[in-house]
């Protein structure tokens, strides 16, 4: 199992302050890990949350945790790129927190932007020192949130 690096509560709080209101939106939590980002979206009124996580044990934990807050979610045990390639619906907010040594950022960004609804937002969490041409970046210690908005 790869090392789990959950989004810190500080970064998670900043993310939802920036997004402001996710109520009624469809949200995807890619590389979900503990699922805390997607669960926070459920708590804040997201219409539906898709969790994508490869690890079987983590998938089961996410299902158990998310079910405490809502039935409006689905957990996919899948690779994030394969999920995006095969997913046929539009998503309002896509959040991705791949491992810091992830090699396919460009493909991830390209596919995520294709799946966004009109006015949708893609947020990529990554280590400081990398830049991906996002419209906006916010730094929190060694973590960066990069934002793209579909216009």
Image (cartoon, rainbow, N blue to C red):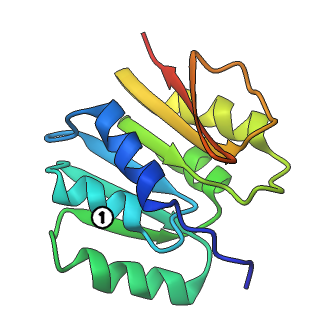
- x then y, percent, for residue 20: 24, 33
Residue with the mark numbered 1: 39
Front-lying residue, 132 or 27: 132
Please rate how many residues cluster around mark 1, counting C-alpha atoms within 10 Å: few if below 14, some from 14 to 19, many from 20.
many
Eyeballing the image, is 108 above or below 147? below
Q: Is residue 144 visible?
A: yes
Query: Which secondary structure lies at badge 1?
Result: helix
State which quadrant residue 109 falls in: top right
Please state if 148 lies on the left or on the right of 121 as rendered: right
For image coordinates 42% across by 63% down, the residue present is 51
Q: Residue furthest top?
A: 151
Q: Residue furthest front?
A: 141
Eyeballing the image, is 80 above or below 74? above
- x then y, percent, for residue 24: 14, 40
Q: Is residue 88 visible?
A: no
State which quadrant residue 43 falls in: bottom left
For image coordinates 22% across by 58% down, the residue present is 42
For image coordinates 30% across by 37% down, the residue present is 17
Q: Quadrant of the N terminus?
A: bottom right
State which quadrant residue 65 falls in: bottom left
Q: Quadrant of the C terminus?
A: top left
Eyeballing the image, is 18 above or below 11? above
Q: Count how many numbered circles sit on residues in the image.
A: 1
- x then y, percent, for residue 35: 42, 68
Front-lying residue, 89 or 24: 24
- x then y, percent, for residue 122: 49, 33
Please state if 32 lies on the left or on the right of 144 as rendered: left
């Amino acid at each position: 199992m790869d090392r789990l690096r959950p989004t810190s509560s500080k970064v998670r709080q900043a993310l939802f302050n920036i997004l402001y209101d996710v109520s009624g939106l469809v949200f995807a939590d890619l590389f979900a890990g503990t699922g805390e980002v997607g669960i926070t979206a459920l708590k804040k009124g997201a219409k539906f949350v898709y969790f994508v996580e490869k690890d079987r044990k983590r998938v089961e934990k996410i299902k158990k945790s998310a079910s405490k807050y809502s039935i409006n979610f689905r957990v996919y045990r899948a690779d994030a790129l394969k999920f995006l390639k095969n997913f046929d619906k539009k998503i309002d907010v896509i959040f991705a927190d791949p491992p810091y040594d992830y090699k396919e950022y460009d493909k991830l960004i390209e596919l995520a932007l294709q799946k966004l609804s009109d006015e949708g937002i893609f947020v990529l969490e990554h280590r400081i020192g990398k830049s991906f041409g996002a419209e906006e970046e916010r730094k929190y210690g060694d973590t960066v949130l990069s934002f793209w908005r579909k216009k």
